[in-house]
Image (cartoon, helix red, strand yellow):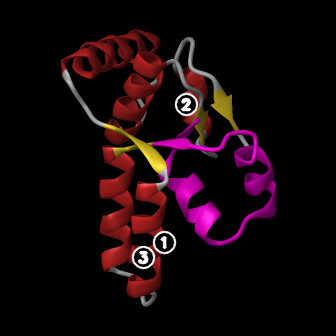
Amino acid sequence: MILDTNAVSALFEGDAALGEQLAQKSRHHLPVVVIGEYRYGVLRSRHRRRLSQLLDSLILDSVILRVDETTARAYADVRDELRVLGRPIPENDVWIAALARQHGEPVVSRDKHFEAVDGLRLVRW
């Protein structure tokens, strides 16, 4: 399962429903895009130290998904498909969707707009 940024936030807040979903797998996939989004958010937080430590721990326990040439091809396909549908989604979420296609993993997110991506499995809680 690929964790979206809102899933990481909910995980660190101790969301029980999300914990049940995540308990199905021992390791999760964490895109570098999500790591960057979360680190940016932490910069503005009063709880910067604690959240940074939690993120560092999650990174160690996760499969890190990096962007490569295969991801770039999937990104182009996803973005074009959404353009044709007239249903754009945030740029970073296009990258996350591309990684999901590339690795054949579902995305754990509360963002409903992922439903517009053909073939993407969305895990909600």
Real-space Cα separation, disc 3 to disc 2, in angstroms = 29 Å
Q: Is mark 2 on a helix, strand or loop?
A: helix
Look at the picture and state if 115 lies above or below 83: below
Location of residue 6 by image quarter = bottom right
Q: What stretch is highlighted in magenta?
A: 1-29
Residue that mark 2 sits on = 114
Look at the picture and state if 4 lies above or below 42: above
Q: Do residues under tags 1 and 2 come within 8 Å of each other at their CB atoms?
A: no
Residue that mark 3 sits on = 53
Location of residue 49 by image quarter = bottom left
Whole-percent x, y for residue 88 in the image: 41, 27
Q: Do residues under tags 3 and 1 come within 8 Å of each other at their CB atoms?
A: yes
Q: How crowded is mark 1: few (under 14 residues within 10 Å), some or many (20 or more)?
A: some
User: Is 7 situated left or right of 31 in this image?
Assistant: right
Residue that mark 1 sits on = 54
Q: Of the residues shown, which amino acid type is indicated by label 1? A: Leu
Real-space Cα separation, disc 3 to disc 1, in angstroms = 4 Å
